[in-house]
Image (cartoon, grey):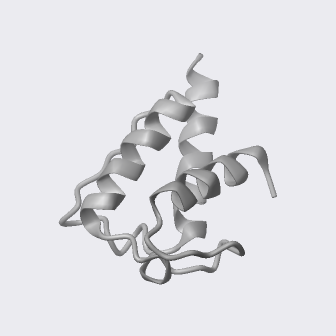
Amino acid sequence: MTDVANKVIDILKTHSRASMENISPDTPLVDLEIESLDLAVIVFDIEDTFGIEIPYNANEEVEELATVGSIIEKVQSLVGDSQKAA
């Protein structure tokens, strides 16, 4: 896994209500017992960690960020875009 993926998974583990050691990109957030409010906090933590801004609306993008892999892909895309802009 990439450095981005490992950091994202570490952040998710911190906020997970379930005790899961083996989190993969296919893991649904519902399996981690992460609720929408938790997801907002996770988004803030990811933004701080990577110095990016994630366009996030809890009412519209919950399905888009339904799995660990979808969050990793979004972060990798934004990190790549921010590096191109620099």
Residue lying at the far top of the rendered structure: 86
- Picture coordinates of residue 76, whole percent (x, y): 62, 47
Q: Is residue 82 left or right of residue 15?
A: right
Residue lying at the far front of the rendered structure: 19
- Picture coordinates of residue 14, whole percent (x, y): 52, 55
80 over 68 or under it: above or below: above
Q: Residue at 18% of width from left, 66% of height from top?
A: 59
| Residue in the foreground of this view, choosing between 31 and 68 | 31
| Residue in the foreground of this view, choosing between 1 and 16 | 16
54 over 82 or under it: above or below: below
- Picture coordinates of residue 1, whole percent (x, y): 81, 58
Q: Residue at 30% of width from left, 65% of height from top?
A: 61
Looking at the figure, which quarter contains the C terminus?
A: top right
25 over 50 or under it: above or below: below
| Residue in the foreground of this view, choosing between 38 and 58 | 38
Residue lying at the far left of the rendered structure: 59
- Picture coordinates of residue 82, whole percent (x, y): 55, 28
Q: Residue at 63% of width from left, 26% of height from top?
A: 84
